[in-house]
Amino acid sequence: MKKAKQGFGGEWTTEKLERVRKYLSAYTTIMSHQTFRFAYIDAFAGTGYRTIKKPDSQEELPFPDLDSFLDGSARIALQVQPRFTKYIFIEQSESRFNELQRLKEEFPQLQSDVILVNADANSYLKDLCSSYSWKNNRAVLFLDPFGLEVDWETIEAIANTKAIDLWYLFPLGVAVNRMLTKNGQIRAIWRERLNLLFGDDGWYDVFYRTIKTPGLFGEKEVTEKIGDFDLISEYFVQRLKTIFAGVADNPLPLLNSHNNPLYLLCFASGNPKGAKTAIKIAQDILRRK
C-alpha cells in the first residue's frame, strides 16, 4: 500500500509519542473499571503514520529501497489495550484525511467506533466540547499542532467540560520564542496571533521590561526581552492552571539535534475528582528518561 508521506520530527517526535502512549495505556486500564464511556481525540491526526528522516547515505538504511514508516499518534491510540470506547480523529488537510481513512481498513474490529472528521480543529473542538453531554463521558485529547493553530478559546472549551485530560504540544521554540523580538517591536499580526494563543495580551508585560539608559540628550527608555524558554514555559503552565483542575508542573521540553527547545509537552486534567491521580501519572511519565 502506498502511503502519503508525513515526514517531520526526529528523536523528539518518538519521545513525545512514547510518553503519550504510556499515559493512554494507564488511562484505559483505569477507565476500563469505571462506568464511563471514554474516547481518544486526536485534533491534528495527520495520516496516522510518520516517516523517519532518511540519513544522508542510503547505505545506512537496512533496506535502502523502502520508506521507513512509523506509527503516528492515531495509530498508536488504536493499538492501546484496554481499548477506548470511541476514537475521534480530526484532520483539516484533505490529502492527509484521505490517507487517514485507511486506518478503518487496518483496524476492522474498531471500524464502527472510529470517527473521522475533515474539519478545522478549533471549530470542531469548541462545538464538541460545548454541545456534547460530558456527564457520563470522558476523553483524552492530544493537541499536536504544526505551529500556532490552537486558540486559547479552544483550550478553555476543553477545560470547561471538566471531563477531558489534555496533552498539548505547545510551540515553545518553533514559533513563540521566534516571534518575541529582542527589542519588543512585534508586528501587529504576530501580536494578535500571540493574543489568541495565550488568551489575552498580558504576556507582553511578562516577557518584556522597560529600562532607562543614559544618552547624549538625557535618559531614554529602552524595551528589552526577558522572556527566555523557562519564563515562557512557566507563564503558559500558569495560564493552564487558571482553567484546569490540575496541571503537571514538569512539562517536558522537546529538543532538536542542537539541544534547543522546539516544543513543550504539557499535560492538564479537567475533572476535579480524577485530576490528582491523572497528574500523578502524567508527572511520573514526563520525568522518566
Image: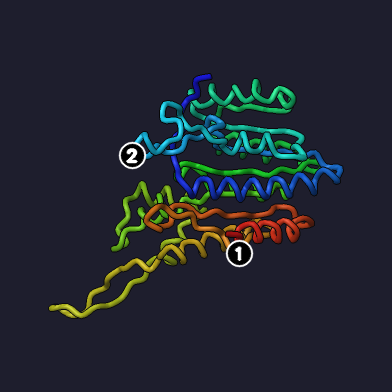
Vertical side of 183 occupied by 94: above or below: above
**In the rendering, which numbered label is found on residue 56?**
2
Indicate the position of residue 262 as horizontal and vertical percent values. Answer: 43, 52
Quadrant the C terminus occupies? bottom right
Indicate the position of residue 202 as horizontal and vertical percent values. Answer: 47, 61
* Residues at marks 2 and 1 touching, judged by CB atoms closer than 8 Å: no
Left or right, 60 with reference to 238 = left
Residue under the image location 49 percent in, 20 percent down: 2
For badge 1, the amino acid type reads Asp
Left or right, 257 with reference to 279 = left
**In the rendering, which numbered label is found on residue 77?**
none
* Label 2: which secondary element: loop
Which residue is situated farthest in the left direction here? 216
Residue under the image location 60 percent in, 47 percent down: 18
Dividing the picture into quarters, in which one does residue 136 lie? top right
Vertical side of 238 occupied by 220: above or below: below
The Cα–Cα distance between marks 2 and 1, rounded to whole angstroms, is 39 Å
For badge 2, the amino acid type reads Asp
Indicate the position of residue 170 as horizontal and vertical percent values. Answer: 51, 51
Say whether residue 156 is visible. Answer: no
Dividing the picture into quarters, in which one does residue 78 lie? top right
Vertical side of 180 occupied by 219: above or below: below
Residue under the image location 34 percent in, 50 percent down: 188
Residue under the image location 47 percent in, 34 percent down: 51
**In the rendering, which numbered label is found on residue 249?**
1
Say whether residue 221 is visible. Answer: yes
In the rendered structure, which disc, 2 or 1, sits on the residue that comes first in sequence? 2
* Label 1: which secondary element: loop
